[in-house]
Image (cartoon, rainbow, N blue to C red):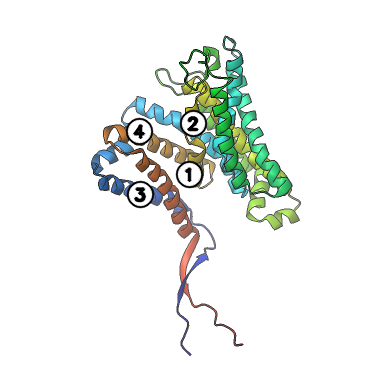
């Protein structure tokens, strides 16, 4: 009887090497960058010009780097909130919708009080934004807990609903009557905008809020018993149930934290660089933050670095579209390839490839 052929099998390693965990995102960046440059060459662009625009231009001037910091804020804030749920195996994919609802909730104050004054306005807008995002995420938590509906599908579909709510408001009751028929709200008064952090730039205090959120996420996940319970519930649900950890509470906490973070980022966007509610508020921050969360290894410090890298890629992509005539689709491919390359690299960091023979079939 001939021996059965050897087949490749992924065997889980006993422990994840810290060096391999750090090397995975670096390899992902190199692989996705090589793919992007290859696409640029195939479309007739100058690879050197594309590489310079993508990698160097975001750091060549203070004005360009300040835009990197501006984009880092919402990415960092949303990714930190999502990562808490992901470590508990609660996959909130609807941060984009929660971001939009946070922006809508925050805009309610300046829309209804266009002449409002007082230092209380922008803090109240941020608070309303966080509550709006958490309320939208609560819909997903409710259906997951009551009917065991997939939070992936529910949160994703609710993002489409949120976009339509935004369209309705900007084409209807919240439309600026003096806005030349553009779908946008009135411009917000000065007290409804966030204070600028660095004079001469658009970076505002929301960047500090994102850093504080990162510190809070680190303390919660790495130093608190509540964070430990949440992570155990995701890694070993049976052990968590045996220890008396409440699964439903973990689902609610994960989704509400993620929704509040996304809603806060949406409020900071309308009260910050935009200064009004627009349809362009939906720029993909919620989806890009998923890449940031995983690229950072779902660790608060790693997410901080990953958010800065992703923001630099975004600003570099804008520069490449102008200076190197790079299509927007290539930048989107770069972001998607980055996530896929990281997942592949991390899989080989967590598992090793072995060649085994399948078990012989039992005789009839």
Residue drawn at point x = 58 percent, y = 33 percent: 162
Q: Residues within 10 Å of mark 2 (few under 14, many from 20)?
A: many
Looking at the figure, which quarter contains the C terminus?
Answer: bottom right
Name the residue tied to disc 1: 291
Q: Residues within 10 Å of mark 4 (few under 14, many from 20)?
A: many
Q: CA distance from mark 2 to mark 3?
A: 24 Å
Say whether residue 218 is visible. Answer: no
**Do the residues under discs 1 and 2 have CB atoms within 8 angstroms?**
no
Q: CA distance from mark 1 to mark 4?
A: 19 Å
The residue tagged with tag 1: helix, strand or loop?
helix
Q: Residues within 10 Å of mark 3 (few under 14, many from 20)?
A: few
Residue sticking out furthest to the bottom: 1
Q: Quadrant of residue 215?
A: top right
Tell whether 95 sits left or right of 144. left
Tell whether 241 sits left or right of 317. right
Q: Nearer the viewer, mark 1 or mark 3?
A: 1
Name the residue tied to disc 4: 318
Q: Which mark is residue 73?
A: 2
Looking at the image, which is closer to me, 63 or 94?
A: 94
Looking at the image, which is closer to me, 200 or 170?
A: 170
Q: Which mark is residue 30?
A: 3
Q: CA distance from mark 4 to mark 3?
A: 20 Å
The answer to which of marks 4 and 3 sits earlier in the sequence is 3
């Amino acid at each position: 009887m001939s021996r059965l052929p050897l087949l490749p099998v992924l065997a889980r390693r006993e422990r994840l090497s810290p060096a391999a965990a750090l090397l995975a995102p670096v390899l992902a960046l190199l692989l996705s960058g090589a793919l992007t440059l290859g696409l640029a060459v195939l479309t007739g662009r100058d690879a050197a010009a594309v590489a310079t625009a993508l990698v160097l231009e975001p750091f060549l001037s203070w004005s360009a780097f300040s835009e990197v910091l501006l984009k880092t804020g919402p990415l960092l804030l949303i990714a930190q909130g999502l990562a808490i749920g992901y470590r508990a195996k609660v996959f909130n994919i609807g941060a984009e919708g929660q971001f939009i609802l946070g922006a809508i909730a925050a805009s309610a104050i300046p829309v209804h009080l266009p002449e409002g004054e007082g230092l209380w306005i922008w803090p109240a807008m941020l608070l309303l934004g966080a509550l709006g995002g958490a309320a939208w995420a609560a819909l997903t938590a409710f259906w997951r807990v009551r009917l065991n509906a997939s939070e992936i599908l529910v949160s994703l579909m609710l993002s489409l609903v949120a976009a339509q709510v935004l369209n309705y408001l900007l084409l209807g009751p919240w439309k600026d009557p003096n806005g030349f028929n553009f779908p946008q709200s009135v411009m917000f008064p000065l007290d409804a905008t966030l204070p600028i952090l660095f004079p001469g730039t658009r970076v505002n205090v929301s960047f500090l809020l994102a850093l504080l959120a990162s510190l809070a996420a680190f303390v919660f996940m790495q130093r608190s018993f509540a964070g430990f319970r949440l992570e155990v519930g995701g890694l070993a649900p049976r052990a968590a149930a045996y220890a008396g950890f409440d699964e439903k509470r973990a689902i609610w906490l994960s989704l509400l934290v993620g929704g509040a973070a996304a809603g806060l980022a949406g409020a900071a966007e309308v009260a910050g660089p935009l200064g009004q509610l627009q349809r362009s508020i939906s720029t993909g921050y919620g989806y890009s933050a998923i890449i940031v969360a995983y690229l950072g290894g779902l660790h608060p410090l790693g997410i901080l670095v990953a958010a800065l890298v992703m923001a630099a890629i975004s600003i570099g992509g804008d520069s490449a579209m102008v200076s190197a005539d790079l299509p927007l689709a290539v930048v989107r491919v770069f972001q998607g390839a980055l996530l896929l390359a990281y997942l592949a690299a991390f899989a080989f960091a967590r598992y090793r490839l072995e060649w085994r023979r399948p078990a012989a079939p039992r005789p009839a």
